Amino acid sequence: MKNTFLSRTVFWGIVLVFVASCTKDDGVELNENGEVIHPEKGGQIVSGDPELNNFIIAAKDETIYTVDAQTGEETVIYAFPDLTDFVGPSDYNNGTIYVTSDDNSINALSVADRRFLWDRYMLEFNFGSMGETRPICIDGVCYASGGSGVVVAVDEATGNLKWYYTTDPNGKLDYVLNVNKPPIVYGDKVYVFSNKGYYSNLPAYLHILDKETGGLIQKQKLPYEPSGVPVFMENTMYLPAKNLYVIDLDTLNTLWMFEANGVGTPFVSGDKLVVSAIPYGQSIGSVLYCLDKNTKSILWEVETGANSLWAPLIVGNVVFSNYDKGTNFPSATNAKPFALDLRNGEELWKNEDVSVDFSPVYANGILFTHGHDILRNKNDEDSVGLLAMDANTGETLWLNPLFRFGSHIVPLVVADNGVFGPSYYRGKQN
């Protein structure tokens, strides 16, 4: 039995907030969603009320925490057994945190009373293994993938198994062959992307499953393994797999392609698409591109340093992402956060004094990430951790050094008006 702790945090449920007024007190014009129409007139580049943000879900070692979004003060929610690691970001619905751990299980935790509710091993596996994905919970069901490419759907309230599907071509459940990307739920289907097999020449595949039964509807060979998280919008899939493929979901025909030597997770807003990519024929540097999704033309491009494929975010007319200066250590990053004008790619701010580990997480005027605030104080150990930044200026607002070594789970922000994660936190698409 997993140990539990008490909690002081109660989440009241997700409430959609609509701004009815046309102006702020300082005369800044707002649209019907409360967003700044002309941000340059009010000294803001984005709008939003930070007080709507309640808490961040974070982790350190074997413990899951909530962190007060206003102060950075942490509260223990639950401590797992020793040497447990997590796959992030987690998911959250109606007062319950859902997180995948490396014993190949999905776990549910109550925020209100810090109680462990249930866990569900992904079939017979009960050991540390590769291939677990973050959970995606929607319409009362949680979906995730575990070791050997087994995808499960479980009841959100009880953890009871609803169905499973294995991406092993022979239907095996006991041979480490496949690793999948997190399932994507869109409409009445679940889309599963399997990577190339470890011990075989098995290519990467797209598996399209029935959302209710888990039955295979269609299986399609992919040109390359996904290099980012696919985006689904208006019956179209934007698939990053070395190149960026724009695909009709009805026919799975490619409508158009952006050729590159690697692309990350795209973000689509209106008629614009931004994506981090390694230009075709190159291998060292990366570029943030803004494309017109109708004409397929490049509107602007900005160099982003070493070849890290960050997942950019668009908020109104602002693009948030990172510039990676590179390090002397393999797989390490030295990323500086920045904000650009979506309309022309001009820099709005860049914080050279912060080095971050994650793609940006935005919620109501604040950016949340994990990193090093270099000039914070003389004690370097207290300058690394979970931090909040003003999205209008890039200024660090608070930093919690408890999470100095807790960067293994991407923060998820729970607010009065929604749940916010990085750009690829899109499990609740419809």
Image (cartoon, rainbow, N blue to C red):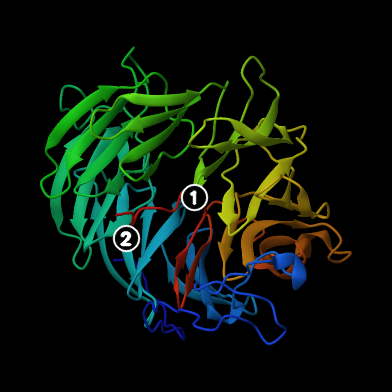
- As shown in the figure, which amino acid type bears the numbered disc 1? Gly
Q: Does residue 363 appear left or right of residue 249 in this picture?
A: right
Toward the viewer: 5 or 336? 336
Q: Does residue 166 appear left or right of residue 382 in this picture?
A: left
Residue 129 location (% of width, % of height): 37, 38
Residue 171 location (% of width, % of height): 15, 27
Residue 93 visible within the image: yes
Q: Is residue 268 above or below residue 94?
A: above
Which callout, 1 or 2, points at the residue further toward the start of the chain?
A: 2
**Rendered-image quadrant of the N terminus:** bottom left
Front of the two marks 1 and 2: 1
Q: Is residue 368 above or below residue 408?
A: below
Give the numbered dot on residue 270. Answer: 1
Q: Residue 155 lies in what quarter of the image?
A: bottom left
**Rendered-image quadrant of the C terminus:** bottom left
Residue 205 location (% of width, % of height): 30, 25
- As shown in the figure, which amino acid type bears the numbered disc 2? Asn
The local secondary structure at tag 2 comes to strand
Which residue does the numbered mark 2 point to in the structure image? 107
Q: Is residue 23 above or below residue 400?
A: below
Toward the viewer: 112 or 253? 253
Q: Specify few, some or many for label 2: CA neighbours under 10 Å numbering under 14, 14-19, or 20 or more.
A: many
The local secondary structure at tag 1 comes to loop
Gap between marks 1 and 2, in whole Å? 36 Å
Residue 109 location (% of width, % of height): 34, 69
Q: Does residue 349 appear left or right of residue 18 in this picture?
A: right
